[in-house]
Image (cartoon, grey):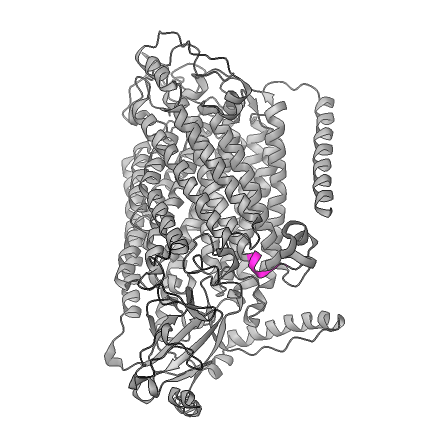
């Protein structure tokens, strides 16, 4: 239906867009096929999952800082696993497992890419909706279903999956090895299988929409970097997620149907298992063939969002547009050939380790180019310090800090001694966890008026939220590098079994205190978000004076986005502060930006970007 | 019931905050312009805060080093580890230099170019020369690191059989380690989990003559200065043999034998005399004494004082007691090692008991 409307819209812009149906509550808010509503559904589901995931981290941070202390809060949230305020070791592993799973897949993949791809692709390329509104709806509801199953798995009797978010077999395959590998693991696998289906439907839709439904004049080189990022992210998803599905299916077979893809020579609980000939290393290969591109699936949309917000709020074009696009493509390509750096000491051939070291360190080059381009975008700008801009600047900061430690971890020789320690935890939390969350938050502050019909979030609360969060994030994860360099492995319920690590207690307390503060201040954000949905102040139609097409749409959400014909595009999306030929004033006098739908003026030079 | 009450309290608290803010909202005067879009004053304040933040991250880094550098690992107790430490130092200098510089540029630009109504941003869209410069600099620096890294990696991973390394099997299971020495012939007997029976806990093939003189122990003793080739097996799930003081780690994978070779260079006794370790152990014992005071006050037993020992610890999530899977490693002189090994019973002796 909406595809049909699309064709009309693209081919004949003078045709009235007369496809409004009578909408019921169900078709408008629940089974909506409108990309704007679906993006809000993704965001709110993602935020809810984020709350669950972050509260889990609060529980295990308390355990790590004060392992001997009894907390009633454990008993409240963990029930029998927190009896008398003592956390059970198995639930500690369950918490870290589900925290990782939720944050990586449900918050940073679906919540970030799902929200902003859905919102911005049609709006910024000038389309009336996604190529298939129906598949888009199915994609969201599959995501919703997988979220429900994941949350449901928290309540099974033997506990949820506890083998780490990477679910390496045999631990994840054998209920004898850990209680969470029973029904909890089955539900985990089902949930992720459904999640992959959702992600694939979404990604295919994004790809088709970007390729086919761009408005007249919107060539690929005029696309905002957000769209480039979402487009390439979707391609990586389509390439790599099916491999995780195959790994999950094989694991299901090993668990339930007696196959031996990943299992061999196992003696557990007093008996030898029949499995013979499989290899856990094969699983690691399959898992990381998705797992590594996955971190770019997480970070690329954030990069796109940051590029866009930074250019808009600097009142300057993004520096090196083509280099930015090229580095997105280079990162996407390299991301599929570096997975082995998670496996340097897995027992795979050391020669492969050399190859993966080489490809891994190559990826630092496009990343460095992007960082320098962002910094240069700020240079000689006229920076408008809106909360979204602050989060974008902080994104570049954490991306650099976290990215630099990647040079240590990507080097196979150095990885030997920091592999699986807290050094890794600190690295990836900064470079993909915190950075991607900053991208998400920046996007929420920036496009909130687009999502909620002109309302703006509170600036003051935004500033409070930003500063405490950014100080807290470094406060948690910078000291964590020391814990890793001291040699402490991750996923330890407590390190009191090793007197050697007793002197790390102070650092753990510092990290947890910062974590508590940082988590607490997210309440300010949630309050700001939900309050502003209903009572936020109405802003102007184009509050940030941006050039992109989404700000030309109606403030009030309508099906089809533009009441009249779809605007045509005459320029790239970064004509900020462009001067006229005489350099006396901006091209449009008194206005420092030229929207994409404004034709080339007589008093400006056409530039080749 | 408690859970319900807690949820209720949270909800009521949320409602009261919401209502209070509504009152404040209503009490305020209607502001002019768009109060939720950054004004010149906001740009100014936030710009200064950016410089403050820059100071924060620098100070955080300095304070962290000042407070916690004594928690870091001591000098490497293995030969190849010195190479790793050297490469680590070079990499750290590179990334700290890059980090300090780029963070400064980022935050300084955010401060100096903070916006106001009169400022005009410079339309500056691209510059191929700049792009080239900051592509080629990382290329050169990374090429250096990659080459150094790959040589180090290859040296560590390629085991030269001519070195006549001591062959030891490290055997992982939930949740303990065992070690098996090849005995007089320095050759390990074949083994498989299907042969596990009674005292033969490692499943060594009783029919294999090489296995008869194997010695299975629960404490790993290594002679100083001799290359040791550690062959690793696991009987149930993935484990990882992590020996941080030797800069050594390798996963133990059920169904295959993995290996890692290194030459210990510092005996346990010598390491206990190391300045860094003396200070660290003293600090740890201070912490333990403090804790013991509380324990004694609660009528519990005091913590024992700590003495440094090398350990192998599990570094791949392996189950509930993953956090306490360890084995002591003793590095000692060749004579002490031989004397210790001679006391251990052979497998044949154990099986015939």
Residue B120 vertical position relative to residue A402 in the rendered view, above or below = above
Q: Is residue B172 left or right of residue A506?
A: left
Q: Where are the magenta residues, as a range?
A: A87-92
Residue A298 on image: x %, y %: 42, 41
Q: Which residue is drawn at the image coordinates 60% and 50% (left, top)?
A: A58
The answer to whether residue B289 is left or right of residue A485 is: right
Res B241 seen here? no
Q: Residue at x 60, y 26 (%)?
A: A532
Is the residue A259 above or below the residue B343 in the image?
above
Quadrant where the N terminus of chain A is found in the figure: top left
For residue A211, say whether it is visible. Answer: yes
Q: Nearer the viewer, residue B23 or B45?
A: B23
Magenta region includes residue B142: no
Q: Give the image location of residue A375, x and y in percent.
A: 41, 39
Whether residue A526 sits left or right of residue A600 in the image: it is: right
Q: Residue at x 64, y 60 (%)?
A: A66
Q: Is residue A90 magenta?
A: yes
Horizontally, is B281 left or right of B208 in the view?
A: right
Q: Quadrant of the C terminus of chain A?
A: top left
Q: Which percent across, then down, holds residue B240?
A: 42, 66
Q: Quadrant of residue A92?
A: bottom right
Magenta highlight: main SS: helix
């Amino acid at each position: 239906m909406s595809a049909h409307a699309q064709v009309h819209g693209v081919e004949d812009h003078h045709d009235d867009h007369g496809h409004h149906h009578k909408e019921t509550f169900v078709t408008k808010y629940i089974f909506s096929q409108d990309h704007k509503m679906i993006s809000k559904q993704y965001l709110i589901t993602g935020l809810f999952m984020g709350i669950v995931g972050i509260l889990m981290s609060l529980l295990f941070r308390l355990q790590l800082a004060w392992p001997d202390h009894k907390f009633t809060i454990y008993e409240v949230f963990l029930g029998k696993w927190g009896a008398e305020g003592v956390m059970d070791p198995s639930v500690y592993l369950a918490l870290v497992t589900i925290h990782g799973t939720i944050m990586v897949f449900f918050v940073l993949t679906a919540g970030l890419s799902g929200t902003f791809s859905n919102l911005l692709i049609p709006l910024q390329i000038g389309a009336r909706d996604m190529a298939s509104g129906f598949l888009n709806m199915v994609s969201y509801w599959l995501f919703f279903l997988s979220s429900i199953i994941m949350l449901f798995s928290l309540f099974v009797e033997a506990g949820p999956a506890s083998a780490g978010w990477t679910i390496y077999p045999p631990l994840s395959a054998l209920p004898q090895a850990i209680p969470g590998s029973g029904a909890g693991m089955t539900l985990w696998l089902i949930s992720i299988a459904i999640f992959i289906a959702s992600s694939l439907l979404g990604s295919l839709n994004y790809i088709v929409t970007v390729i086919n439904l761009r408005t007249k004049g919107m060539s690929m080189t005029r696309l905002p970097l957000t769209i480039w990022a979402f487009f390439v992210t979707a391609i990586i998803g389509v390439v790599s997620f099916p491999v995780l599905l195959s790994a999950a299916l094989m694991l299901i077979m090993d668990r339930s149907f007696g196959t031996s893809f990943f299992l061999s020579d196992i003696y557990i609980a007093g008996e030898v298992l029949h499995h013979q000939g499989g290899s856990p290393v094969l699983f690691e290969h399959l898992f990381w063939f998705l797992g590594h591109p996955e971190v770019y699936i997480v970070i690329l949309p954030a990069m796109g969002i940051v590029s866009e917000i930074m250019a808009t709020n600097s009142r300057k074009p993004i520096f090196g547009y083509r280099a930015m696009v090229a580095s997105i493509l280079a990162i996407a390509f390299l991301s599929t050939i570096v997975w082995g750096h998670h496996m340097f000491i897995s027992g795979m051939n050391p020669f492969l380790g050399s190859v993966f070291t080489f490809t891994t360190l190559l990826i630092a080059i496009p990343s460095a180019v992007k960082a320098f381009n962002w910094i240069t975008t700020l240079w000689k700008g006229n920076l408008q310090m809106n909360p979204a801009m602050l989060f974008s600047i902080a994104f570049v900061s954490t991306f650099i800090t976290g990215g630099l430690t990647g040079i240590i971890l990507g080097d196979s020789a150095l990885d030997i001694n920091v592999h699986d320690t807290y050094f890794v935890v600190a690295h990836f939390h900064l470079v993909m966890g915190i950075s991607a969350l900053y991208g998400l938050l920046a996007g929420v502050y920036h496009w909130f008026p687009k999502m909620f019909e002109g309302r703006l979030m509170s600036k003051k609360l935004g500033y409070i939220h930003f500063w405490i969060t950014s100080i807290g994030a470094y406060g948690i994860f910078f000291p964590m590098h020391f814990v890793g360099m001291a040699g402490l492995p991750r996923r330890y319920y407590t390190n009191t079994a090793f007197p050697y690590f007793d002197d790390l207690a102070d650092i753990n307390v510092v990290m947890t205190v910062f974590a508590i503060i940082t988590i607490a201040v997210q309440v300010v954000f949630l309050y700001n978000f939900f309050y502003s949905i209903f009572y936020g102040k109405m802003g102007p139609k184009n509050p940030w004076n941006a050039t992109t097409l989404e700000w030309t749409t109606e403030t009030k959400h309508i099906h089809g986005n533009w009441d009249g014909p779809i605007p045509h595009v005459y320029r790239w999306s970064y004509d900020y502060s462009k001067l006229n030929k005489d350099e006396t004033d901006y091209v449009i006098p008194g206005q420092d930006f030229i929207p994409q739908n404004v034709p080339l003026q007589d008093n400006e030079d056409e530039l080749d970007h | 019931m408690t859970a319900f009450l807690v949820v209720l309290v949270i909800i009521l608290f949320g409602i009261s905050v919401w209502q209070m803010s509504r009152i404040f909202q209503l009490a305020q005067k209607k502001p002019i312009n768009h109060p939720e879009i950054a004004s010149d004053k906001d740009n100014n304040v936030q710009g200064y805060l950016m410089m403050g933040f820059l100071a924060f991250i620098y100070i955080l880094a300095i304070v962290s080093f000042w407070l916690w550098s004594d928690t870091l690992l001591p000098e490497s107790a293995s030969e190849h580890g010195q190479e790793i430490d050297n490469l680590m130092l070079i990499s750290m200098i590179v990334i700290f230099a890059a980090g300090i510089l780029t963070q400064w540029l980022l935050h300084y630009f955010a401060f100096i170019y903070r916006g106001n109504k009169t400022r005009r941003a410079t339309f500056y869209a691209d510059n191929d020369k700049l792009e080239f410069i900051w592509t080629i600099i990382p290329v050169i620096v990374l090429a250096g690191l990659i080459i150094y890294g790959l040589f180090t990696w290859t040296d560590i991973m390629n085991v030269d059989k001519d070195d006549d390394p001591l062959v030891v099997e490290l055997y992982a299971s939930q949740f303990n380690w065992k070690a098996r020495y090849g005995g007089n012939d320095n050759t390990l007997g074949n083994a498989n989990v299907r042969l596990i029976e009674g005292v033969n806990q490692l499943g060594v093939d009783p029919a294999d003559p090489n296995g008869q003189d194997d010695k299975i122990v629960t404490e790993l003793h290594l002679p100083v200065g001799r290359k040791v080739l550690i062959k690793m097996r696991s009987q149930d799930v993935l484990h990882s043999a992590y020996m941080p003081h030797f800069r050594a780690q390798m996963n133990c994978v059920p169904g295959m034998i993995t290996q890692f070779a290194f030459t210990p260079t510092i005996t346990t006794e010598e390491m206990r005399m190391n300045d860094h370790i003396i200070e660290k152990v003293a600090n740890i014992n201070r912490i333990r004494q403090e804790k013991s005071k509380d324990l004694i006050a609660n009528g519990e037993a005091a913590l024992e004082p700590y003495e440094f020992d090398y350990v192998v610890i599990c570094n791949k999530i392996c189950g509930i007691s993953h956090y306490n899977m360890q084995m002591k490693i003793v590095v000692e002189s060749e004579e002490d090692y031989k004397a210790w090994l001679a006391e251990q019973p052979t497998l044949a002796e154990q099986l015939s008991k």
